[in-house]
Amino acid sequence: MTTPKPWTNWDAPAERWLLSGFPRDIRERSILLELATRIIFPTVLVLSIYLLFAGHDRPGGGFSGGLVAGQAFALRYLAGGRMDDSAIISLRPPVLIGVGLTLAIATGFVPLLFGQEVLESAIYKFTVPVLGKIKFVTSLILDTGVYVLIVGVVLDLLRTLGSGVETDAAAAAREQES
Amino acid sequence: MLALVAVHVLVALVLPVIAHRSTRAAFIVAALPPVAGLVWLLTSTGFVLGGQEHVEVVPWAPQLSLELTFRLDPLAFLLGLLVTGVGAAVLIYSISYFQQGSAAAKRSGALLLLFAGVMLGLVLSDDLITLYVFWELTTICSFLLVGQAGISRESRRSALQALMITIFGGLLMLLGFVVLGEMAGTYRISELVASPPEGAWMPVAALLILMGAFTKSAQMPFHNWLPAAMVAPTPISAYLHAASMVKAGVFLVARLAPVFLDVPEWRVSAVALGVITMVIGGWRALREHDLKRLLAYGTVSQLGFLMVLFSAGTRVSAMAGATLLLAHGLFKATSFLVVGIVDHNTGTRDIRELSGIARRMPWLAVVAVLAAASMAGIPPTLGFVAKEAAFEAFAHPHALDLVVLAGLVLGSVFTVGYSFRFLWGTFGDKTGVPATSAKPLDAVLFVPTAIPSVAGFALGIGYPFADNAAAGYADEIGETSYHLGLWHGFGAPLVCTLIALVGGSVLQYYRAGVSKARDDLPAGPDAQHGYERIMAALERAAVGVTGRSQAGSLPTYVGIILVTVILVPGGALLQAAHVPRDLRLYDNLLQIPLAICVLVAALGVLRAQRRLTAVLMVGVIGYGIGGLFVVDGAPDLALAQFLVETLTLIAFVFVLRRLPARFTQGDVSWNLRWPKALVAGTCGVFMAVAALIFSEIRQAPPVASHEFIARSEEGAGATNVVNAILVDFRAFDTVGEISVLAVAATGVASLVLASRFDRRKRSGSSRVQPSGEPVAASALNRGSSSSAFEAEATESAQASESPAAQRPSSEGNTSAKPPSVAPDSADRPSSEQEAQE
């Protein structure tokens, strides 16, 4: 058992993001934005997943969901700058893009195993005790692939046009000083 | 037969795994499929020589009437023996030749086996398209085997040259195949042979196909890739560039000779070029000091000889050709492998440095003498048998025949000359040269070397075997009662042989005089030089076209696109469209404020002085259009529009950090301002009018949309029809689109990362850094000393750097964001860079 936290530390952050220890220059920082980001970020991610699942019957889908998730990361980048791109490093945008594309294409071939056509979808309906009736359509996997790929693309954008350009500017400035 | 080819390819695919553990084991495993092929061929000897044929047809793409067709007939049998037999010998030889565990060994084992497989496929194929596929596969294998690791400039250059020349010929040949196949209505070679098509296009087909054969079989003036390819390890030269691959060209000529019997263009061009190649190749071989290059020019010469024999179109010449095909493969394989052993054990293959090898490796000398005897045509070798038949074929009192005969005899004199030169250069004692030290002979190297030459000797004595096989092929050409033999009585052929032997001996005896004579001769046109000039001209042309079409100016590109849009679809619209009826001003009151909002923002973009303002205004336009979607009842579209708009805005703002804050029109573009405005305005008006007209001219209700809506519930399990279309009805489109997105994202990332400031600095100071490398490497790869190209490449590299030089200065203008340099940021970005890479 871990020792119980003193009540003064109950609201201490458990996650390190946006608290990397390398804050931006004070002139570029907005504490309010950082705080808001820390609060909003998980919520936006949940929203993106909701959009992914809801897409079948309501507005949403993998594309919109992926964009929303990507914009959650964009918000984080806007708040933290390149000193806080831990998400990009740990998630590796090119890997995400590849995983998404592979997921979408590979599952497209699965129906062939059951004598169906490429990319054909099947519908499963079953009942779960608490949640009630659940409908699962296999095309959701394709949509998930799209979702992952879009997140990867947005993170790649943040990596190149975001931190990339920022690093570039810093290097150019150093060059001018010296 | 397909199974046999497939086994080669499959084993080649798993070979890297074995080679990872032990390259020796890999070569042993690699030798198994060719041995199996050899055994299969030998067991079907009686069957094939008895006049029967194996035929196998495998449908490939029936809708296009493409099929893989294989046929084992006497000609395929002969070359098949070489491909499998020499292949097995070379692979066993490689066990000892390549250093255990070296990268070259790991690479070469699999590639050699792959090559053996596709070459066997080429030999057995009975369909022009099948043959072409295998033909190009052998070219690719050759490229990879010659290029090896691509570390030395010479190997890259040679590999590329071989690839360029043979692919050039191969494509022309494909064209010829298509002409021929379309004329005959079949691509099956056996059917073409049975009933050759006739028509005005036959000469065209003949010449196009010959181009493929000439380039592949290194005929003048395309021969120079072959000596250059000698940079490859010797087993590869022995197999690809002596015994098998270069035979593909003459094999094709032999295959199609019955089809083109009545086409004089075929015979005249091939015979003429063959004689010239034989004579010049032999002459060039006499002056080489590098043993491999000597043999390479010898191969060029012999290929010319084969070309003459196969294209002459008489039965005797065809028999001589088929026999020489086998004989040449056997003695040339041994010769190369001998050179390989000498090179491997002494460290040199230069004639001027080797001395006294015969005493150190007497058995090797015996084997080499057998091979050289066959090469020179000394009885009782197979080479002699073949040459007798060859001289017989042209020993007629007919002016043209006699000219060809004279050429062949001259070529044979040179052949004998360089055969002696090869023996003397490799094994002889040379005055003034100390005896070369050599490692002892290795059995694993020696046995595969000895087998082909002994076989050439044995088959000379046992000539009925070659006689049967050659006659089996030559019966397609014509009918005579000629038989191969060691003794045909005193006659013209024997006299020719004697002239060749005596002349060759004289050449060797007076070698000092010969070398002086050829140094005094004026240097003729050099094919290598010609190739380099053509390549340099191509590169200059490519740079010129790219420089003009890719001006690098965004206004120019956009202008061209917009003008095209106005002219082509706009012109069509003006011609065909009529004014739509019952136009409504609006459907919903909410559209009016949204439209006004969009229009005002559009005007704002035009008036904006600062980039940020313009970007925000464009964003407003996007959101406005998203609002219109909402009003029209398309929440899915609106959602996507808002999200994409937001992301675009963010991306724009990211980029704006490195651009000047204001649009710097300056004073240059005032003249262009009105034309630009005119083009932009016209295009905008066109888009608006087109949108109105196109939506009005719909004549029937959209069927697909109704079906989508009707079926989305039960078909895709979705009540949101947009999503049902995206992930089910049109899922294939979605997959295509996300693939494009993945490619585009990767491309953008590469561009941005490659042009980063710190990289540019590094590559500017020393040209070996990552971003500088592609330019430098490609310039090197072009081969040829095209200094013009390299100069231009450097120029363009500098040009691409110049904007970089301007950027820091423009940074001064923005001034709004003083860049933050945290104390440790110097380390961190670099480590993060590595993490990203």
Image: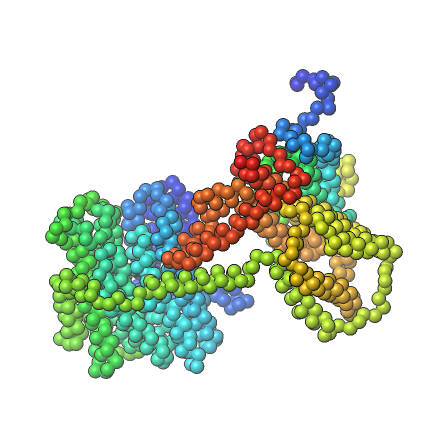
Q: Is residue B187 left or right of residue B462?
A: right
Q: Is residue A7 above or below residue A59?
A: above
Residue B97 position within the rendered picture, expressed as x and y whole percent measured from the top left: 28, 47
Residue at the extreme right? B589
Indicate how the structure is coloured in the image: rainbow
Q: Is residue B219 above or below residue B743?
A: below
Q: Is residue B416 left or right of residue B167?
A: left
Residue B696 position within the rendered picture, expressed as x and y whole percent measured from the top left: 79, 67
Q: Is residue A146 left or right of residue B442?
A: right
Give whichever of B241, A35 is nearer the camera: A35
Give whichever of B353, A125 is nearer the camera: B353
Give whichever of B606, B292 is nearer the camera: B606
Q: Please tell me how many numbered marks the rendered image carries.
A: 0
Q: Residue at x 36, y 68 (%)?
A: B213
Q: Is residue B764 above or below residue B552?
A: above
Residue B740 position within the rendered picture, expressed as x and y whole percent measured from the top left: 61, 53
Residue at the extreme front? B667
Q: Quadrant of the N terminus of chain B?
A: bottom left
Question: For residue B668, what is the image quadrant?
Answer: bottom right
Does the rendering let one see residue B290? yes
Q: Residue at x 39, y 68 (%)?
A: B212
